[in-house]
Image (tube, rainbow, N blue to C red):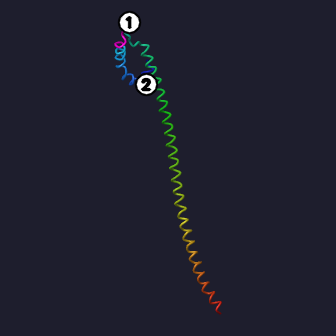
């Protein structure tokens, strides 16, 4: 019995169903008294201990399921956290590269403008050279 005293959840669940157990046995006896030839059934201590053992096994199994679900969720949170960190690093990298790209765009634009001007000058000089 000492093994059950340390499990608060088990004790709470048993406290909830214990008052109903004699009532259900009484209802069963009333409904099927003719089959038992007038003899009443009762909840024997062995049945009660089996019931305690069943609830201990059930809560242990459910606790294991909950532990597995918690571990799965923690793993998912770790993955999401790592993804967030990766995305943040990529954003910073993109911002740094976009500054470089903008500078290069400006330089290329300036070079193209200079080329257009030089091209116009060359075209203007060519007709003059042909006329001479």
Tag 1: Cα neighbours inside 10 Å, few (<14), some, or many (≥20)? few
Q: Residue 81 placed where, x, y %?
A: 50, 46
Image height check: is 62 above or below 23? below
Q: Residue at left 53%, top 61%?
A: 96
Report the side of 99 relative to 36 (left or right).
right
Residue 28 location, quadrant = top left
Above or below: residue 115 compared with residue 65: below
Of callouts 2 and 1, the N-terminal one: 2
Density class for disc 2 (Cα within 10 Å; few <14, some 14-19, many ≥20) is few
Please name the residue that numbered disc 2 is placed on: 7
Q: Position of residue 9 (x, y in %)?
A: 41, 26
| Residue closer to the observer: 53 or 30 | 30
Residue 113 higher or lower than 79, as above or below: below
Where does residue 72 sit, x and y in percent of width and height? 51, 38
Task: Give the quadrant of the C terminus.
Answer: bottom right
Q: Mark 1 points at which residue?
A: 37
Q: Give the range drawn in magenta.
A: 29-36
- Tell me what residue is drawn at x 53 percent, y 67 percent: 102
Give how far apart the Cα atoms at labels 2 and 1 are.
Answer: 40 Å
């Amino acid at each position: 019995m000492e093994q059950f005293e340390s499990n608060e959840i088990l004790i709470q669940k048993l406290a909830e169903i214990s008052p109903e157990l004699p009532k259900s046995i009484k209802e069963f006896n009333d409904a099927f008294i003719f089959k038992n030839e007038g003899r009443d059934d009762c909840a024997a201590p062995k049945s009660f201990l089996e019931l305690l053992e069943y609830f201990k096994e059930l809560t242990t199994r459910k606790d294991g399921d909950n532990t597995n679900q918690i571990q799965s969720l923690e793993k998912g949170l770790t993955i999401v956290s790592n993804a967030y960190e990766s995305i943040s690093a990529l954003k910073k990298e993109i911002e740094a590269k976009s500054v470089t790209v903008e500078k290069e765009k400006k330089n290329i634009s300036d070079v193209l403008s200079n080329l257009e001007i030089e091209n116009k000058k060359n075209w203007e000089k060519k007709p003059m050279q042909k006329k001479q």
